[in-house]
Amino acid sequence: CKDYVSFNSPAVNADTKENKALVRAIHSTVKGIRADITAEFQFNTVISKLREFVNAIYDFIKDKKEYSDTDKAVLSQAIYTLVKLMAPVTPHLAEEVWAEFGGQGSIHETAFPEYVEALTKADTVTIAVQVNGKLRDTIDMPAGSSEEELKAAAQASEKVKGYLAGGNIAKVIVVPNKLVSFVVK
C-alpha cells in the first residue's frame, strides 16, 4: 500500500464507480466522526466508523491488479484521512503511521479532516422491487428519483413484468431511494 500512497497528492475527481464509492466513504466517515467527537463524545462509535472505513478501503483495493493515477490519488486521500481520523483515539499509532508515510511534523498539529456534504450522498441508489412482499428484482436509479419514475422503472423490469401480468395492481408502495412494492390480486 505504501508504494501507492503519497500524502502530497492533490485532490482528485473520482472517475469510476469504485473511486466514487471510496470518495463517498471518505466524506461520510469524516462527517460521522466529526459529529461523534465534537457533539456527542461517542468514541465507541468512532472506532466502529473507522473499522467500516477500513473495510471500504479494503473493498477498493482487494481485487485491483493495477492502479490508475486516479486510483492512486483516491487511495492516498483515503489513507491520509484514515490516519488523521485515528489520531484522537489511537494517538501513538497514528503518529507512527504518519511519520512512516512521510507526514510532516506531528499529526496532532495538523487540521482535522473536513468533509463536503455533496460528496456524502450517493449518485445512484439500488431500489428493491417486491411483488406481493417477495423480492423480485433490484434496479439502480438516480438518487432522488420521483415516485412516478421509480414505479415506471420497476414496472419496466423484465423480471417483474411476469409477476404483474394477468393480475390487477391493487396497491403500490414506494419508499423513496429504497423500495417499490406491488400488491397484485
Image: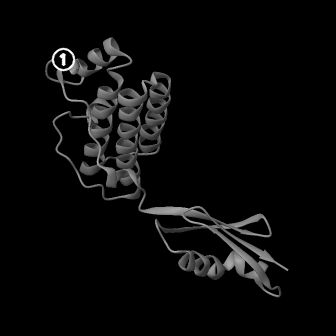
Q: What colouring style does the render use?
A: one colour
Above/below status of 142 relative to 18: below
Q: Secondary structure at mark 1?
A: loop
Using residue 8 as the reference point, say whether residue 132 is left or right of it. right
Crowd band around label 1 with a 10 angstrom C-alpha radius: few (<14), some (14–19), many (20+): few
Residue 67 rendering spot, x and y as whole percentages: 32, 47
- Counting the numbered discs, the total is 1
Using residue 183 as the reference point, say whether residue 43 is left or right of it. left
Above/below status of 104 relative to 53: above
Question: Mark 1 — residue?
Answer: 106
What residue appears at the point 37 percent right and 40 percent down from the top-left corner?
31
Residue 94 rendering spot, x and y as whole percentages: 31, 19
For the residue pair 167 and 15, the one nearer the viewer reads as: 167
Q: Quadrant of residue 114?
A: top left
What's the residue type where badge 1 is placed?
A: Ser
Q: Quadrant of residue 75?
A: top left
For the residue pair 144 and 60, the one nearer the viewer reads as: 144
Using residue 173 as the reference point, say whether residue 103 is left or right of it. left
Above/below status of 64 relative to 174: above
Which residue extends farthest right?
185
Above/below status of 88 relative to 81: above
Residue 51 rendering spot, x and y as whole percentages: 48, 30
Quadrant assignment for the C terminus: bottom right
Which residue extends farthest front?
39
Residue 21 rendering spot, x and y as whole percentages: 41, 51
For the residue pair 184 and 42, the one nearer the viewer reads as: 42
Using residue 160 as the reference point, say whether residue 71 is left or right of it. left
Quadrant assignment for the N terminus: top left
What residue appears at the point 36 percent right and 58 percent down from the top-left corner?
16
